[in-house]
Image: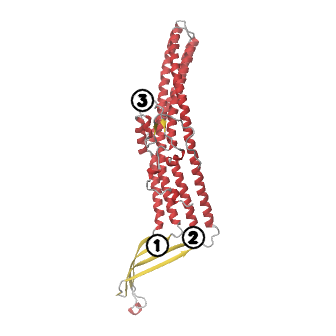
């Protein structure tokens, strides 16, 4: 795959960059988030399902590996026949008791390497399942972090809206007082009350978002959704911007679990292609039966005797109307499909990192501009309230200033959420510290054992 030496959207920063450790969520500086993520990683059902798939894949690999070894079994039999015919007749039809025991061996000698290829393919499937566990853990950690920040954002927006509703209600009370004194019109009073009601109407949607986020977090943590997961935190502060080490695009092949799993599937399908081609080669079968037998005829005990039966068989295809070739072509197509899927996954992975870096840089600029906007508009609101109390401006001007403050504060809260989401997405796109070396340090590289 043609990959660049670096990501084009990566900003050059002199600050200390955060690494891609396993516990990347600790870098947000929040005390609650690591507890939630660690609990989810140990209790989430998707992670548990992925672990069971690893057990299945490893059992399948063991089953394929058993084909390389002979099968040994035990046979035992006891028989007895007795008739009431005269003794003279029993010479031709004797009474008989037989005790027989032996070992049975059957072995398909892997001349063409088809069984070995099947074993290696199953091992590649098992490694893909292991990478799937890392992928499930990364998805769960990312989703917990996402939902946690969505919850904190909804709580912050709810507090902002409630404060503005309270302020608007106070404004309506002042306008009503002035209306009684003849200093304000009924239009001003209706306008003030309508603004308060309009802000109040936005509160249920925010409470709904808080409630549904709680239930989503509960499911991610394997808890009862009827029980709240975390309590509201009025002291919550959004994490500060930080530099994140991205490395080179080629390092994604080691970091991302989905790319590791896709690579393993390429190896598995290529190995199955070798298994399919091995069907054209002769097969050699060895069978053996050895044992001991104790025989008694007409009350005459014969000495225990040994017996054996050894056979060697050779089978080779000559004509099968293209069945083997069709199987080879079908498997080759599956191998090519797996390779194309891997190539697409690599391109998508690079795209996700580039997009995340671009979102982070642009959202940082937007957040800084919105912070200045909020500061200036809050200052203008304080002045407008003072001027309105002194009667120098009318209510409509004050309401416009209040709406502008509301819009800028909500926009800043949304920008802070999007900035945290961009960090999470970048960690997820980079693989969250996953490495093939962490999974199996002694594992043979897939390329080294994949037939060309």
**Please, what secondary structure does the residue beneath circle 3 have?**
loop
The reply to whether residue 223 is in sight is: no
**Please, what secondary structure does the residue beneath circle 1 have?**
strand
Q: Residue at x 63, y 64 (%)?
A: 326
Q: Position of residue 225 (x, y in %)?
A: 44, 39
Tags 3 and 1 in contact by the CB under 8 Å rule? Answer: no
Give whichever of 74, 118 is nearer the camera.
118
Q: Residue at x 50, y 49 (%)?
A: 254
Residue identifier under label 1: 106
Give whichever of 85, 90 is nearer the camera.
90
Give whichever of 67, 94 is nearer the camera.
67
Q: How far apart in space, not on screen, are marks 3 and 2 (Cα)?
A: 70 Å
Residue identifier under label 3: 233
> For residue 135, which numbered disc appears in the image?
none
Q: Position of residue 429 (x, y in %)?
A: 52, 42
Query: Which one is earlier in the sequence, the residue at label 2 or at label 1?
Result: 1
Q: Residue at x 47, y 75 (%)?
A: 287
Query: Which one is earlier in the sequence, the residue at label 3 or at label 1?
Result: 1
């Amino acid at each position: 795959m043609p990959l660049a030496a670096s990501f084009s959207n990566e900003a050059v920063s002199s600050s200390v960059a955060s690494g891609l450790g396993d516990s990347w969520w600790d870098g947000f500086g929040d005390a609650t988030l690591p507890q939630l993520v660690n609990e989810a990683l140990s209790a989430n059902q998707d992670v548990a399902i992925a672990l069971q798939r690893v057990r299945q894949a490893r059992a399948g690999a063991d089953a394929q590996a058993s084909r390389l070894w002979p099968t040994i079994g035990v046979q035992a039999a006891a028989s007895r026949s007795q008739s009431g015919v005269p003794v003279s007749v029993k010479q031709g039809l004797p009474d008989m008791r037989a005790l027989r025991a032996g070992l049975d061996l059957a072995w398909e000698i892997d001349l063409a390497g088809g069984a070995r290829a099947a074993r290696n393919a199953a091992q590649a499937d098992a490694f893909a399942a292991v990478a799937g566990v890392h992928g499930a853990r990364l998805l769960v950690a990312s989703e917990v972090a996402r939902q946690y920040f969505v919850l904190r954002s909804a709580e912050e927006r709810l507090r902002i809206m409630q404060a503005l509703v309270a302020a608007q209600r106070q404004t309506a009370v002042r306008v009503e007082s002035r209306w009684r004194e003849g200093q304000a019109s009924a239009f001003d009073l209706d306008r003030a009350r309508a603004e308060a009601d309009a802000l109040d109407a936005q509160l249920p949607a925010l409470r709904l978002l808080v409630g549904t986020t709680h239930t989503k977090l509960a499911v991610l943590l394997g808890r009862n959704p009827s029980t709240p997961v975390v309590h509201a935190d009025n002291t919550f502060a959004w994490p500060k911007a930080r530099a994140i080490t991205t490395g080179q695009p080629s390092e994604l092949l080691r970091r991302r679990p989905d790319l590791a799993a896709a690579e393993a599937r390429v190896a598995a399908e290529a190995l199955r292609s070798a298994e399919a081609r091995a069907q054209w080669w002769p097969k050699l079968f060895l069978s053996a039966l050895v044992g001991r037998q104790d025989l008694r005829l007409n009350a005459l005990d014969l000495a225990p005797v040994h017996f054996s039966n050894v056979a060697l068989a050779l089978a080779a295809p000559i004509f099968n109307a293209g069945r083997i070739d069709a199987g080879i072509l079908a498997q080759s197509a599956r191998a090519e499909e797996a390779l194309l899927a891997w190539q697409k996954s690599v391109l998508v992975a690079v795209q996700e990192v580039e997009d995340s870096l671009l979102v982070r840089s642009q959202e940082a600029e937007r957040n800084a501009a919105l912070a200045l906007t909020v500061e200036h508009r809050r200052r203008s609101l304080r002045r407008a309230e003072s001027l309105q109390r002194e009667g120098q401006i009318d209510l409509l001007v004050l309401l416009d200033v209040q709406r502008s403050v509301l819009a800028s504060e909500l926009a800043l809260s949304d920008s802070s959420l999007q900035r945290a989401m961009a960090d999470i997405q970048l960690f997820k796109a980079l693989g969250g510290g996953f490495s093939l070396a962490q999974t199996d340090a002694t594992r043979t590289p897939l390329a080294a054992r994949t037939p060309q």
